[in-house]
Amino acid sequence: MGNCKTENAAKALCAAEIALLEEGYPVASIANQYLPDYRKAIARAIDEGRLPRLELPPSLYGKVYPHWGLYHLTYPK
């Protein structure tokens, strides 16, 4: 995720990771266990300075996300 230079690159990486998880796990496990764990790891990496903090404007996303991975590594409701 740290190598993604654009939102599209991060979005593609997140979609690929979700597709890979879907090959081996039930959707409920992915949505309720794996993706939250991934998002916590991304948030921790941001807090520790291992991932860059991005200020994505709430006007585009509905709330402030400090990294594209936190926005795109989710299942739609």
Image: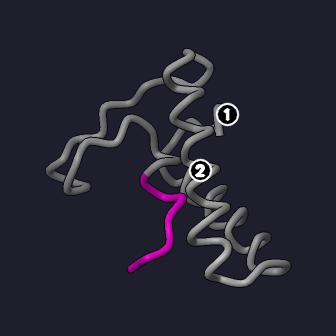
Distance of label 2 from label 1 (alpha carbons) = 9 Å
Q: Position of residue 19 (x, y in %)?
A: 72, 74
Q: Residues within 10 Å of mark 2 (few under 14, many from 20)?
A: some
Say what amino acid the circle numbered 2 marks: Ala
Q: Position of residue 16 (x, y in %)?
A: 71, 65
Residue at 56% across, 29% down? 44
Residue 33 occupies quadrant: bottom right
Seen in the picture, residue 67 relative to 63 is either above or below; the reply is above
Q: Position of residue 42 (x, y in %)?
A: 58, 38
The residue identified by callout 1 is: 3
Q: Residues within 10 Å of mark 1 (few under 14, many from 20)?
A: few
Segment colored magenta:
71-77
Q: Are marks 2 and 1 in contact (CB under 8 Å)?
A: yes
The residue identified by callout 2 is: 9
Say what amino acid the circle numbered 1 marks: Asn
Residue 51 occupies quadrant: top right
Residue 60 among those drawn in magenta = no
Residue at 30% across, 40% down? 56
